[in-house]
Image (cartoon, coloured by chain):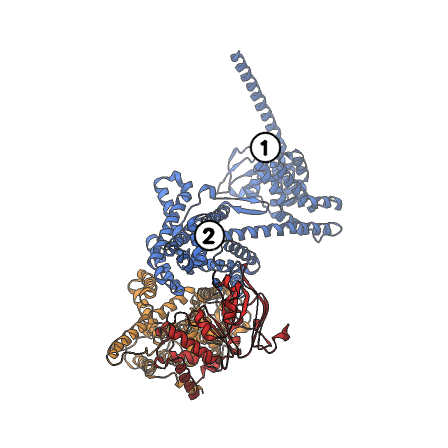
Chain colours: A red, B blue, C orange
């Protein structure tokens, strides 16, 4: 079984997870190649968020394999360890550190030693400042550098969170509904940004917005009742009769 | 016809009376002559001859002997040196008045130096007790017989064996008979009877109350021959019984403590489950309930004493209403402004608890207040070797009733349905049109009201003081945490487990250390299962 | 690296506070020692003890603020660390009595003679040496905090659960220290101290020195707290306070951070307790009373949590009020304290210092609006 995981970045096989009898994830299998970008769609309750929780260590699966980079069993690690292995996550509801400035939010996310004593004696270096400036440029928040994150608009918080993801320099980004609450322009920009990121890193995007998914132009996985219903290009998937029945709502 | 019958009855009664008086007079005269030398013998010679005289007196079976022997034990018998007779006197003054010990008639006064008090040692005392015991063993009054048998049992005097034998033969009450047989066994063990008799005696002793049997058997466990091992084996048997009963007693104490904890914690469990806030003034609601009981009883005492037995029934609804209204006021006045800030709620309600305590202190004073038990809650009864007080029993029953009543409210009423909905998912409940603020206020009122009636129950077994509630907040929270939030069955199991665990640890570790151990155990338990024994599961909860 | 770290804690505002505390450390003892008793500015004996007590409480409040204001851990059991530090100091002071006790035993303290102890319990060894006792003042509370925090934080006990089990912790210690066979004086605790480091504890010079030492300790801890909260670690702590699980997802082991600040805070509370005991002259189990710990929380709340000056101001204000109330209107004190809890949580969630700062910032922002339309908030404020 494990040999199949070889060469993949993320490998989920026959994962189950039930909450009080409700099967949130029911035999889910998914393989992500290094450098791949994947969009995941599915109706509410299809298990998208639970899948993210399982990959990032927030929830432990009842049974099944979750393997990162072909060798690491993610079910044995907690959130912090998994994050430090190089899996970053953006939440559905944007969560930034509201009483920190935008720059501090990014500094906290920057790739660095994470131990208490390391951070206690940490002095921010020139390289780190430059990196923060660079990310601020990318997420178009340079002018808001010293604002408290609490004072940002909803869309800006979304971008700040993506910026924090970038600062972590993860090998795999899990992005949950990045364009919820964004205008059409912002949505397009976000899609462009994600495509740029996907050149160097692997990305999994969960999204409801079909226009956005179309703009990403990547392979799509459809989840339904905790397992994979269909996989393929958006066009192929949207013409799949099963998908049409459960998701596109006929 | 009727007249004739009446006269006939009269005559019969009259004749019977005359015969009785004559017989009594004759008997008196006979006894007087028989007993006199024996009584005088009490005062002459050494302890041995005194003891012999005691046994002789006891053997006479005369009802007056008991009184004389008690006087001997009470050091009221004197030897009159001038005529070597024994007289009775209180020995007070220079010239004490003396009495004939048998008739009780006064014999005038004598100079003190003429009298010589009859000395008594432990051996004599034991002999007296045995004698008095045997004398009353056949009394027509069952209570007198029972205490006589107990007295004899205590002395273990071999001389009592014949008296016991005849008493046993005549005894009709099974319990007293067992007691007498046991006393006989004890006396046989203490005598120089052959081993075979003693082996039977050991069996007889085992019929006694386990603690008494234990005490007697311990002395013979090392005896030579067959008696020692037999006594040892019997002791092991008795010890097992004793241990079993003491375990049962501990379980009972634990259940009793657990039901008190349940009463105190169940209100907290509801409010914490529904609203996620801890009401640190919860204990004060209990305290207020206890003071409502006190106030009701005071009122009854002064105006209608006849209602005293109903005081608790009157206090229950009042306590529920007073504490419940207080709870609603607290929720509306303070807690709703702190929604989503559980730690601040904790602080604000702590402040409230200080205010309420001081308020009660200002009104009722700082000292403990006495709340009386109605007659149906006082006293105790025994089951085997367990002693159960009525007040504790009623509290257990009451706690169970409250528990199931609450269960019914939550399961069967629309309010309960809405409350459960809010517990499970507040935003969703709100979206479905449940007025969550109203549910919050009502839940808080309900939780506080239950705390109030818990106070009524607690007033029966605790001192009612302004600090009454303080001790319960940590314990109650531990129960809630241990049982799992939002689950009443968990609260029940949690309360009973902690109560029983506490009472089982107490004999080994002492009350204080036992409590500490329980606290440490719960702190460790939260590590393993942060959501308690009966945790609600689900994605919403884990988030 | 350490100096760099400590210097990082300094700025103009911190310097002003430090200078103020140091001034108090010098001026009050001088007023006590140098002025004759009839001078209106003379600080009498009782006031020295009183002010010293306020400063100890201020240090306790500061330590509590470090965990509550910056990391969101509401401890209702910090009094336990304070009392443990106090007991460590008390044990040293007991050993210093030597043969001058009522029973005159050269080694055993009076209460042990009274309870028929034949020899000193093992845990009393070493407390005849000041350095050892001083070490224990930080190590014992630190060790308890470490063990407790290790279990609690690793299993992610948070919020009101954590608060209540901290309360249970101090409650359990209260019960334990009441026992005579703890070997720590039971109900009566440790008292009748004679001298400290060879100086009589009651002497004016010693009082002055103890007061100065307390002020210095407060200044030092204030400086350390300032450096910690301004470091990157401080930022992580605030991040944990505001969004714990988010902090985990960017790779910080939250439990380690909590444990670090929890132990540091417990040690500071221990120091506060150790300075408290020689000035008050007694330590007994009532210091473990959960009510004391919660009272300390209100000092922090009144002053303003999440600011370092707040707890100091709050502790002094509330205790000054307590002193006044308990002598003028004793029966009203609990009403006042209770009302303080309610009023502060409802109407003054930022506390005195936080509210004043907000007021100044809003004023300066209003002025700045005319100059630039967008003005960022200069300083992070706790969201809660």
Q: Closest to the observer: B475 or C195?
A: B475
Image mark 2: chain? B
Q: Closest to the observer: A11 or B71?
A: A11
Percent across and percent down for residue B482 are 51, 59
Determine whether the residue tagged by mark 2 lies in a helix, strand or loop: helix
Residue denoted by label 1: B140
Q: Nearer the viewer, mark 2 or mark 1?
A: 2
User: Is residue C81 visible to us here?
Assistant: no
Indicate the quadrant containing the N terminus of chain C: top left, top right, bottom left or bottom right. Answer: bottom left
Residue at 72% x, 44% y: name it: B200
User: Is residue A214 visible to us here?
Assistant: yes
Q: Is residue B459 above or below residue B98?
A: below
Judge left or right: residue B158 versus residue C30: right
Residue denoted by label 2: B263
Q: Residue furthest top?
A: B1
Q: Residue B427 lies in what quarter of the image?
A: bottom left
Percent across and percent down for residue A179 are 42, 72
Q: Is residue B70 above or below residue C367?
A: above
Image mark 1: chain? B
């Amino acid at each position: 079984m494990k040999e199949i995981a070889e060469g993949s970045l993320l490998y989920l096989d026959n994962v189950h997870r039930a909450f009080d009898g409700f099967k949130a994830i029911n035999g889910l299998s998914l393989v992500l190649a290094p450098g791949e970008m994947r969009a995941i769609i599915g109706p509410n309750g299809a298990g998208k968020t639970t899948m993210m929780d399982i990959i990032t260590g927030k929830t432990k699966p009842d049974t099944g394999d979750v393997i990162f980079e072909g060798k690491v069993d993610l079910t044995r690690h907690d959130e912090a360890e998994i994050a430090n292995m190089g899996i970053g996550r953006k939440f559905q509801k944007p969560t930034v550190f509201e009483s920190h400035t935008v720059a501090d939010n990014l500094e906290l996310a920057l790739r660095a030693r994470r131990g208490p004593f390391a951070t206690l004696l940490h002095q921010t270096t020139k390289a780190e400042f430059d990196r923060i400036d660079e990310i601020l440029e990318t997420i178009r928040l340079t002018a808001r550098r010293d604002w408290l994150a609490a004072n940002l608009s909803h869309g800006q918080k979304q971008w700040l969170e993506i910026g924090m993801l970038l600062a972590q320099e993860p090998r795999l980004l899990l992005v949950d509904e990045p364009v919820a609450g964004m205008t059409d322009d912002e949505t397009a920009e976000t899609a462009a940004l994600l495509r740029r990121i996907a050149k160097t890193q692997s990305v999994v995007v969960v999204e409801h917005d079909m226009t956005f998914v179309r703009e990403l132009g990547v392979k799509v996985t459809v989840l339904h009742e905790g397992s994979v219903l269909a996989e393929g290009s958006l066009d192929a998937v949207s013409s799949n009769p099963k998908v049409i029945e459960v998701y596109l709502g006929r | 016809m009727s007249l004739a019958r009446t006269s006939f009855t009269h005559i019969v009664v009259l004749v019977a009376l005359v015969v009785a008086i004559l017989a009594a007079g004759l008997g008196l005269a006979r006894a007087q002559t028989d007993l006199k030398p024996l009584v005088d013998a009490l005062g002459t010679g050494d302890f041995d001859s005194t003891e012999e005289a005691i046994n002789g007196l006891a053997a006479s079976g005369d009802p007056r002997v008991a009184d004389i022997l008690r006087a001997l034990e009470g050091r009221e018998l004197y030897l009159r040196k001038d005529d070597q007779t024994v007289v009775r006197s209180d020995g007070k003054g220079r010239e004490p008045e003396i009495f004939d010990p048998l008739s009780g008639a006064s014999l005038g006064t004598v100079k003190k130096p003429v009298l010589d008090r009859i000395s008594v040692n432990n051996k004599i005392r034991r002999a007296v007790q045995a004698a008095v015991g045997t004398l009353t063993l056949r009394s027509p009054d069952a209570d007198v017989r029972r205490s006589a048998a107990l007295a004899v049992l205590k002395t273990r005097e071999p001389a009592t064996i014949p008296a016991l034998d005849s008493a046993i033969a005549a005894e009709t009450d099974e319990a007293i008979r067992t007691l007498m047989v046991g006393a006989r066994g004890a006396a046989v063990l203490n005598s120089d009877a052959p081993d075979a008799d003693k082996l039977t005696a050991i069996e007889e002793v085992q019929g006694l109350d386990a603690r008494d049997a234990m005490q007697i058997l311990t002395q013979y466990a090392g005896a030579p021959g067959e008696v020692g091992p037999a006594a040892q084996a019997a002791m092991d048997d008795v010890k097992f019984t004793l241990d079993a009963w003491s375990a049962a007693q501990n379980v009972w104490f634990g259940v009793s403590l657990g039901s008190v904890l349940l009463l105190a914690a169940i209100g907290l469990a509801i409010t914490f489950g529904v609203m996620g806030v801890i009401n640190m003034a919860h204990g004060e609601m209990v305290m207020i309930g206890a003071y409502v009981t006190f106030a009701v009883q005071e009122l009854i005492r002064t105006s209608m004493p006849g209602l005293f037995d109903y005081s608790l029934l009157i206090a229950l609804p009042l306590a529920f209403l007073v504490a419940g209204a207080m709870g609603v006021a607290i929720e509306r006045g303070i807690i709703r402004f702190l929604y989503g800030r559980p730690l601040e709620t904790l602080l604000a309600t702590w402040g409230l608890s200080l205010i309420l305590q001081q308020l009660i202190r200002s009104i009722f004073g700082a000292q403990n207040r006495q709340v009386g038990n109605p007659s149906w809650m006082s006293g105790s009864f025994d089951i085997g070797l367990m002693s159960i007080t009525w007040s504790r029993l009623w509290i257990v029953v009451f706690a169970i009733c409250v528990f199931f009543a609450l269960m019914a409210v939550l399961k069967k009423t629309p309010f309960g349905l809405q409350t459960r909905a809010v517990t499970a998912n507040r935003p969703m409940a709100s979206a479905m049109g449940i007025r969550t603020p109203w549910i919050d206020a009502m839940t808080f009122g309900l939780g506080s009201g239950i705390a109030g009636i818990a106070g009524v129950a607690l007033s029966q077994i605790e001192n009612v003081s302004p600090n009454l509630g303080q001790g319960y907040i940590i314990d109650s929270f531990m129960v809630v945490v241990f049982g799992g939030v939002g689950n009443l069955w968990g609260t029940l199991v949690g309360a009973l487990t902690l109560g029983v665990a506490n009472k089982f640890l107490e004999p080994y570790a002492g009350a204080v250390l036992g409590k500490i151990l329980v606290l440490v155990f719960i702190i460790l338990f939260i590590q393993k299962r942060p959501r308690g024994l009966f945790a609600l599961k689900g994605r919403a909860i884990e988030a | 690296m350490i100096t760099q770290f400590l210097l990082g804690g300094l700025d103009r505002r911190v310097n002003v506070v430090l200078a103020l505390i140091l001034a108090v450390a010098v001026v009050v003892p001088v007023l006590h020692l140098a002025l004759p008793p009839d001078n209106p500015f003379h600080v009498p004996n009782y006031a020295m003890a009183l002010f010293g007590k306020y400063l100890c409480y201020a240090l306790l409040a500061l330590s509590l603020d470090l965990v509550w204001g910056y990391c969101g851990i509401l401890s209702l059991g910090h009094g336990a660390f304070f009392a443990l530090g106090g007991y460590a100091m008390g044990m040293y002071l007991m050993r210093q009595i030597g043969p001058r006790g009522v029973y005159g035993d050269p080694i055993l303290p009076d209460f042990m003679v009274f309870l028929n102890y034949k020899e000193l319990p093992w845990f009393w060894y070493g407390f005849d040496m000041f350095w050892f006792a001083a070490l224990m003042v930080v190590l014992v509370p630190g060790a308890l905090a470490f063990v407790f925090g290790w279990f609690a934080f690793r299993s992610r006990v948070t919020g009101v659960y954590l608060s209540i089990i901290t309360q249970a912790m101090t409650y359990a210690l209260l019960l334990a220290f009441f026992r005579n066979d703890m070997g720590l004086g039971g109900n009566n605790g440790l008292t009748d101290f004679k001298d400290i480091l060879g100086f009589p504890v009651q002497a004016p010079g010693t009082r002055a020195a103890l007061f100065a030492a307390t002020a210095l300790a407060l200044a030092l801890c204030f400086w350390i707290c300032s450096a910690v909260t301004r470091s990157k670690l401080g930022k992580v702590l605030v991040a944990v306070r505001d969004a714990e699980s988010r902090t985990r997802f960017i790779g910080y082991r939250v439990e380690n951070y909590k444990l670090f600040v929890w132990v540091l805070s417990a040690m500071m509370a221990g120091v506060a307790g150790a300075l408290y005991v020689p000035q008050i002259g007694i330590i007994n189990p009532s210091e473990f009373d959960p009510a004391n710990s919660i009272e300390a929380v209100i000092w922090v709340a009144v002053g303003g949590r999440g600011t370092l000056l707040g707890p100091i101001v709050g502790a002094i204000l509330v205790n000054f009020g307590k002193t006044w109330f308990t002598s003028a209107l004793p029966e009203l004190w609990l009403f006042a304290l209770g009302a303080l809890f309610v009023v502060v949580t409802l109407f003054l969630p930022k506390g005195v210092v936080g509210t004043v700062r907000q007021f100044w910032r809003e004023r300066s922002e209003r002025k700045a609006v005319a100059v630039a339309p967008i003005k960022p908030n200069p300083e992070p404020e706790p969201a809660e």
